[in-house]
């Protein structure tokens, strides 16, 4: 019972954060809306029993990505015209597209209800089997992410320095 | 309505709100954040199914998606900063002539 109430509460919080992202004028408020959505999603993951993904969500998304984003917003000029006029002239077609997509996906979801996905012999998610599998079966993928991050750092420096490294 | 279906419905709603944000907002940074919202919505549906199936592979895959999303932001933000340095605005309507 409590879990169901919490599920609806955090889902409502996630939706509210997403709506704030659409209507807020200043990017900092949009970033705060996104952070609240991500925290609500982390709470939903914890409710589902996948605590490790909830921790990943808080550490990687809220802790790293969004802090980076907030820093960049603080770096930029607040008198930018895009801070005053929120919407481009694609407002009507965009709203139509999103409404059509939402209706299609909702209709699909309503048609395929209740099918059990649990494979025979599938157990609940537990941290210990995940940790063992993560560092035994997926160690190569884990190491490849570090290679990817190095590539990204080099690429970011190359982008900022530009052609010939004028004013990097 | 069972729990998984509700969460997948929530992920559909978040994805559509994110798509709407990418299309209608003018600020380049806000568009990036709406893209992050779309990624989060898709990850929510993946986590829902992975938790339902008790799959460790799903959880490992979510970790990889998080790292790729962090990498995407780390590349996208310098590009936005360069655009701002050149055009003096964050308004995507001003970025004409980006082709070729």
Image (tube, coloured by chain):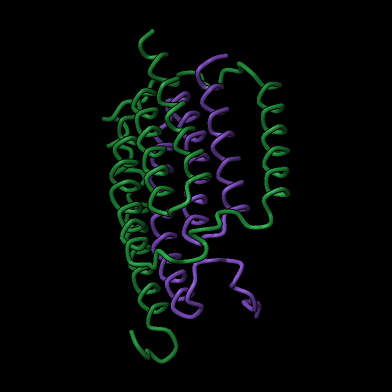
Chain colours: A green, B purple
What residue do we see at 48% from left, 59% from top? A83
Residue extending farthest top: A1
| Residue A36 figure quarter | top left
Quarter of the image that includes the N terminus of chain A: top left
Q: Is residue B84 left or right of residue A151?
A: right
Q: Is residue A161 left or right of residue A21?
A: left
What residue do we see at 33% from left, 56% from top? A70
Q: In this view, does A130 lie to the left or right of B28?
A: left
Measured as percent of width and height from the top left, residue A151 is found at 38, 69
The mark total stands at 0
Measured as percent of width and height from the top left, residue B15 is found at 57, 40
What residue do we see at 52% from left, 60% from top? B27
A163 versus A109 height, above or below: below
* Closer-to-camera residue (B78/B4): B78
A129 versus A140 height, above or below: above
| Residue B73 figure quarter | bottom left
What residue do we see at 44% from left, 33% from top? A14
Measured as percent of width and height from the top left, residue B52 is found at 47, 23
* Closer-to-camera residue (B12/A92): A92
| Residue A98 figure quarter | top right
């Amino acid at each position: 019972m409590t879990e169901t109430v919490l599920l609806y509460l955090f889902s409502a919080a996630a939706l509210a954060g997403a709506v704030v992202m659409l209507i807020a004028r200043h990017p900092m408020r949009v970033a705060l809306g996104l952070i609240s959505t991500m925290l609500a999603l982390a709470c939903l993951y914890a409710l589902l029993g996948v605590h490790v993904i909830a921790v990943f969500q808080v550490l990687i998304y809220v802790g790293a990505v969004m802090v980076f984003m907030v820093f960049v917003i603080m770096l930029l000029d607040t008198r930018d015209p895009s801070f005053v006029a929120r919407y481009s002239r694609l407002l009507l077609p965009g709203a139509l597209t999103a409404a059509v997509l939402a209706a299609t996906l909702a209709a699909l979801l309503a048609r395929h209800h209740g099918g059990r996905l649990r494979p025979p012999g599938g157990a609940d998610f537990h941290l210990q089997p995940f940790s063992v599998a993560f560092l035994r079966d997926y160690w190569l993928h884990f190491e490849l992410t570090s290679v990817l991050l190095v590539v990204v750092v080099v690429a970011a420096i190359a982008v900022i320095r530009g052609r010939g490294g004028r004013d990097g | 309505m069972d729990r998984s279906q509700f969460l997948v419905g929530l992920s559909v709603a978040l994805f559509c709100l994110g798509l709407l944000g990418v299309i209608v907002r003018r600020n380049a940074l806000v568009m990036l954040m709406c893209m992050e919202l779309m990624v989060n919505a898709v990850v929510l549906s993946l986590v829902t199914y992975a938790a339902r199936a008790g799959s460790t592979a799903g959880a490992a895959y979510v970790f990889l998606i998080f790292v790729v999303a962090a990498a995407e932001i780390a590349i996208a933000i310098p590009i936005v900063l360069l655009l701002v340095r050149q055009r003096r605005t964050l308004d995507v309507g001003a970025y004409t002539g980006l082709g070729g």
